[in-house]
Image: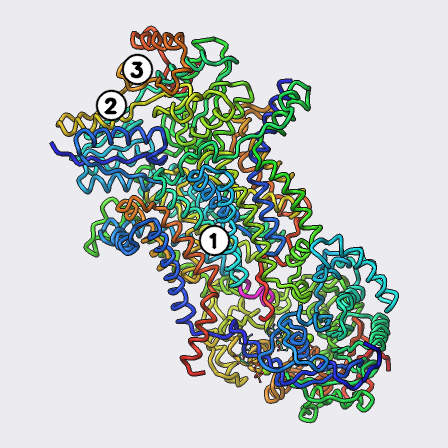
Amino acid sequence: MSPHSSANEPAIELVGIDKKFGTVHANKDINLSVAKGSIHGIIGENGAGKSTLMSILYGFYHADAGEIRIQGTPVTIRDSQAAIAVGIGMVHQHFMLVENFTVLENVMLGAEGGQLLAKGVAGARKELKRLETEYGLDVDPDALIEELPVGRQQRVEILKALYRGADILILDEPTGVLTPAEADHLFRILRVLRDQGKTIILITHKLREIMAITDTVSVMRRGEMVATRKTSETTVAELAELMVGRRVLLRVEKGDANPGPVLLSVRNLTVKDGRGVTMVDDVSFDVRAGEIVGIAGVAGNGQSELLEAIAGIRKPVSGEILIDGQPVDSVDPARLRQLGLAHIPEDRHHMGLVLKFEEYENSILGYHRDPRYGRGAMLDLDAVRKDAEEKIAKYDIRPPNARLKTANFSGGNQQKIVVAREIERDPKMLLIGQPTRGVDIGAIEFIHRRIIEMRDAGKAVLLVSVELDEIRSLSDRILVMFAGKVVGEKSSDADEQSLGLMMAGIAA
Amino acid sequence: AEIKPALVYGTGGKFDKSFNEAAYTGAEAYKKETGTEYRDFEPTSDTQGEQAIRNFASRGYNPVIAVSFAWTSAMEKVAAEFPETKFVIVDSVVDLPNVRSVVYNEAEGSYLVGLLAGMASKTGKVGFVGGMDIPLIRKFGCGYVQGAKSVKADMQVFQNMVGTTGAAWNDPVRAGELTKNQIDQGADVVYAAAGASGLGVLQTAADNKKLSIGVDSNQNHVHPGSVLTSMVKRVDLAVYNAYKDTAADKFTAGVQSNGIKDGGVVAAIDENNKSLITPEMQTAVDKAKADIIAGTVKVHDYMTDNSCPM
Amino acid sequence: MEYFDTFVSILGSAIRLSIPLLFTALAGLFSERAGIFDIGLEGKMLASAFAAACVAYWTGNAWAGLGAGILISIIFSLLHGFASITNRGNQIVSGVALNFVAAGLTIVLGQAWFNQGGRTGQVPPEGRFSGIILPGADMMREVPIIGPLYANVISGNNILTYIAFLMVPISWWVLYRTRFGLRLRAVGENPGAVDTAGVSVVWLRYRALIVTGFLAGFAGTYLSIAQSAAFINNMSAGKGYIALAALIFAKWKPVPVMFACLLFGFLDAFANFMQGKSMPLIGEVPVQIFQALPYILTCVLLAGFIGVARPPKAGGVAYTKER
Amino acid sequence: MSTASVPLPGWISYGVIPLLNLILAFFFSGLVVWAIGENPFEALKFLIEGALGRGDAIGFTLFYATSFIFTGLSVAVAFHAGLFNIGSEGQAYVGGLGAALVALSLDHYVPWYVTMPFAVIGAAIFGAAWAFIPAWLQAKRGSHIVITTIMFNFIGAALMVYLLVNVFIVPGKMAPETRTFLAGGQLPKLDWLMALFGLKLGPAPFNVSFIIALVMCYLVWLLIWRTKLGYEMRTLGISPTAAVYAGIPYVRTVIIAMLISGGLAGMMSLNAVMGASARLQVEFVAGAGFVGIAVSLMGRSHPVGIIFAAILFGILYQGGADLSFEMPNITRDMIVVIQGLVIFFAGALEYMLRPAMVRLYQTARGK
Ligand SMILES: Nc1ncnc2c1ncn2[C@@H]1O[C@H](COP(=O)(O)OP(=O)(O)OP(=O)(O)O)[C@@H](O)[C@H]1O
Ligand SMILES: Nc1ncnc2c1ncn2[C@@H]1O[C@H](COP(=O)(O)OP(=O)(O)OP(=O)(O)O)[C@@H](O)[C@H]1O
Ligand SMILES: [Mg+2]
Ligand SMILES: [Mg+2]
């Protein structure tokens, strides 16, 4: 295929794609068309359904309904093999690499060129060499994946796709794990690929990247494709609004803050994630009684790890956390709760709730050792249920049934269960992660009001959210995190533009 | 009188080509002769044996014969529950007025086959593979050693036990391996007193072109030309006699001890092993038998003092 | 020289005892490397021992026996696959269940067909795999050191023994030098990688299980018609678990698997030899210590005291794309 | 759309599906019976009559069920904490040592009701001790508890055989077992209980440990659903990440759960050692630990379910013995086959019928 040939002819067309996971409607009647030889961006909040859509295109999931057309021909993509056959390659959000294999083995996997490896190996080496010179994708073919930095691992993923002769390349949040320099390198490669006639779909949360590299861009929200724009004809502001889609609705009434003494203090905290990558890098800040400190930032810049370290779930590598001036030495969430630290976790399904428990059982999670729920070793279920029912009434949790399995509540109500549990304990400090992710408008307002009430009652609140609106409307002070560091502090009336730039790592 | 006989085997199973098969042969012989049907049962575990004995007794079977020492405690219980029923236990002693305990002088029988082994051995080394390590099996071993050493005082006798649990009766692989060990060490005749595991001994000896000695039943036919002889316990007779005595109302309780004198233990010689037994061996065996009956040769019984003087 | 003879004898015994372990551990290697735990190796061994003995008894043909052993073992493997791959059931529960079925069914059928308390009939000599004297074994015997080793350890074993040792390099070659091996190792580490590479995870895992069944079939056959001449109740006697231990001990690698099996076989042979004998300084060592040693070693290894054993990462969990 | 996450009402999940699985298991067992030339229905008749037809039969059935309740509870408690304890067999075996030591040292001096509490504690402590090392290895070093407990079954067997053969054996006796306990070391039979129902217990060793087992069912129910520890165990078992969030100590919870599990397994020995044979014998557990897996799976890890499942297996064991007596062609090992099939269908294939049930349920509800 010759480069730059008929740039307007679509390489990919998706018509009416629909997908449900159990009761989650991940993709609702999606239509999308991507022109050949272009870079097309897809943006959307967490859980908007981007990865699902791409996985369907790649044959990893099966759509419940809809049609896929590649280069104008309708195709059924039964499995990834079929996708590869029609020239689609994908770099997954979570790398699909075998960690204790070499680069070469990973690249060859599924495309070995014969029953015996020996035959294909020489050819693969030659091909890797060619790809390296052609696109500047250099990696040592004999290195083990687990010994490579993530940037390199991603390069292997791209090589895998190209090795299979992909004409269409899908990259799912490729820069989430990359340093800015690595990201720039990646973009250079993508441009080369496009100029050679490849079609590229790029999924990202980062508007800066969209503006920098894409030709066209689509926005997804809550499983729906809400808009498609020419990049040259849109702005960061418009995209952000399309993405979030409800900024106009929210302005929480709140008075001025009345900060008291420092209750929570973080000193030179450094935290690594499971793979040993430094996610929080020498961070220090204070939270006072009676104020809400918001931490803004693009997902994956260390906010989650910061929150987990303070909550005693993740062990910091170095640094200090002081509560009420006292250093916390043990990594023990139970102990922290006794000290008056409540925590609404980011991930309610895996942390905040045991979905198979009945509602009342979740209403004491973490506080179950409290004497008010039973003396000694016993649990007083009557007391627990009574307590749960009071919370259900007070927080308008629906359906008002403490014996219902938690999994059977909707996302918003599940979140209310967590919020009620943590706030009703009357803690001194409150850690909140993504308080309203996947929660409907009514519940958002309710939860926001509770958070303000906590502040007004003299509690110290630390709020992490990727939703800028939320941060801006709740926080008294805003800290911006980028690449594991706090890159700046703003007051609550800071304008969105400058915050956005800071979040993108461009100091303002 | 008409009787309703029953038979409970040991866990080795009816056709173990050994102990249980001998009991089966006796029952069959009685059936053939009198036309009396009998019922038998092959338990696979200890609890099951007790249940079977009780089942028979409670359903009016009489006499009930249990072969194997494993049913001792079961017999103690059940026989006490059914004082009207006649019971026979083989290889163990149960002291109750309605129980006949049939025991054998395995030491004497083993002495005879030990003698043959000693004479047949060219290397001056012979072996013994026992099943479960219990006094009864040591008794076999001890008699065997005495017999072998009566040929040549410096005869070397290797002794091994397959195991220490009931599984030892059912592990021909390990038994074979132990036999191979002994053969490697120079043994050229190996005596198996190991229930079904013994088949592994006979097999290994045959595979390695050495001689073996069977036990309980006449096992000479299992590998003709390789099984030197078998130390036969006439369990068949015990079963047959028990049925016959009961039918004739002549059942007697108490211990019935069978040695060489009573023909209860013999070294089997038949067409399968004729070629292996030289005339000298035959005379030596006959002489030993006579000496034992006369009391000039005393075979030490391990179980009297839990030790073997050799 | 006497010590040397003893040593040769123990070595020969060790080899005979390690063969069923070796086949079984290699069998387990294929399924576990593909991400399917297999507690059911014991049952496969038992079932194939039974099938091999029956068919060898009826036909008087050892190879027919082997074929039957392999076939039944593959059927058990496929059942395990049906439960744990197709129906995403718990692999351990499935393995435990199949062990029970094998243990019971062999006796039930054995009793029904042969009436010998669950045992099969005595397999005739033509129905067995018997020892093969390698060329020159008798001439070599007199050569010091290597002579006895050649004549008594290397020569004189049955064909399955040689096949077992041949299976080690073959397994290695299949795992590391073929496309199937590459994919199999990958699917045990990250099935997602295999799936996105356009290879069916399900079919791949089924094929791995078929290989497992194939190899475990040899193990059972060896037990009943090479080492013995009949099937005996529960004759696998926990060897499947020892093989599993050897597999872990060898960190899921073919050549170390061979050494681990030889080690466990040696322990067993040594225990047999040591029976009733006393060791210098220690005195008579209870046989039970030797019997328990493989299990103790495995626990020590699992505790990470002898280098950590890292199992295949995706092992034990069913592959699901959709939660 | 995948059906995995569609909720089904409890009566289908805990009633209909297990029942269908059970029926499937019996269907295939019937095929085996048919294959060896016997009539499956007649076999079933013998089995049920043999297990429930007479007073002593019921006594035997309940005797077996008692053992299975203990081991079923053992497996279930560990399971609630997310641990798969395959070691109940070995823990019961070693637990027997505890019971026997108490019985041997007290039976001369005190009546059984004084011995009993000590024996319960002794059996539990020894069983728990045998679970401790695998538990510790899992909690501290991440060693897979399935493998370590299997290994400990074998190590326990070797240990017990050694002790029985070399330490406890009565001189002059054939079998490696302890001396017979005097009445002070035996748990009396429950004749009176059977008499209440107008049944004669006869020789069946149905004894007081049945009552201990029922008490344990209640205590386990209390533990799992009414105590803070049980709450922590369940949280850990269902969602390890939520347990971390809630500050539930992993090491402590795993070890305690396994100690309780091992202790319950150990108590199984009360029934076999002090209730039935009045002596410690080799291999007295006879697979009850493994049956516990099936019982726990069938009973959905709930004490009430476990009681029913244990009785079901008691029926299989006792009825199976009678069946093999009536039909010599069918050995008692048929029960092992059925047991395996029950574990296979109720455990390994538990999801097999689910999609079909979901579809049926949805059509029935007119969706
Ligand atoms: N395999 C799955 N099974 C069940 N639900 C799923 C599965 N994958 C995704 N979902 C759900 O589908 C919805 C869309 O998820 P998806 O991963 O497509 O979002 P996304 O836009 O890629 O989000 P992110 O930006 O966080 O990657 C979410 O609610 C998610 O929880
Ligand atoms: N993990 C899960 N397992 C089982 N059922 C679930 C799960 N998550 C959600 N559900 C079911 O799906 C339904 C819809 O959940 P979802 O979170 O999409 O609600 P929602 O429409 O976003 O509601 P809300 O507006 O309150 O957030 C819930 O009522 C619940 O029954
Ligand atoms: Mg995504
Ligand atoms: Mg929602």
Where residue D62 appears, as percent x and y from the top left, is 31, 52
Q: Secondary structure at mark 3?
A: loop
Q: Determine the image quadrant of residue A303.
A: bottom right
Q: Confirm or reject: label 2 Cβ below 8 Å from ligand 2.
A: no
Q: How is the image coloured?
A: rainbow
Q: Secondary structure at mark 2?
A: strand
Residue C75 tag number:
none
**Any part of residue D122 in sight:** no
**Any part of residue A327 in sight:** yes
> Does residue D277 belong to the magenta stretch?
no
- Mark 2 → mark 3, Cα distance in angstroms: 16 Å
In which quadrant of the rendered image does the N terminus of chain A lie? bottom right
> Does residue D241 belong to the magenta stretch?
yes
Q: Amino acid at mark 3?
A: Ile
Residue D261 tag number:
1
Reply above or below: B183 against A431: above
State which region is magenta.
Answer: D236-243
Q: Determine the image quadrant of residue C8.
A: top right
* Residue C280 horizontal side relative to residue D329, left or right: right
Determine the chain carrying the residue at label 1: D
Q: Amino acid at mark 1?
A: Ser
* Residue B164 horizontal side relative to residue B298, left or right: right
The residue pinned by badge 3 equals B260
Q: Amino acid at mark 2?
A: Val
Q: Residue at x 37, y 64 (%)?
A: D19
Determine the chain carrying the residue at label 2: B
Q: Residue at x 75, y 78 (%)?
A: A201
Q: Residue at x 62, y 63 (%)?
A: C200
Q: Residue at x 24, y 22 (%)?
A: B256
Residues at marks 1 and 3 touching, judged by CB atoms closer than 8 Å: no
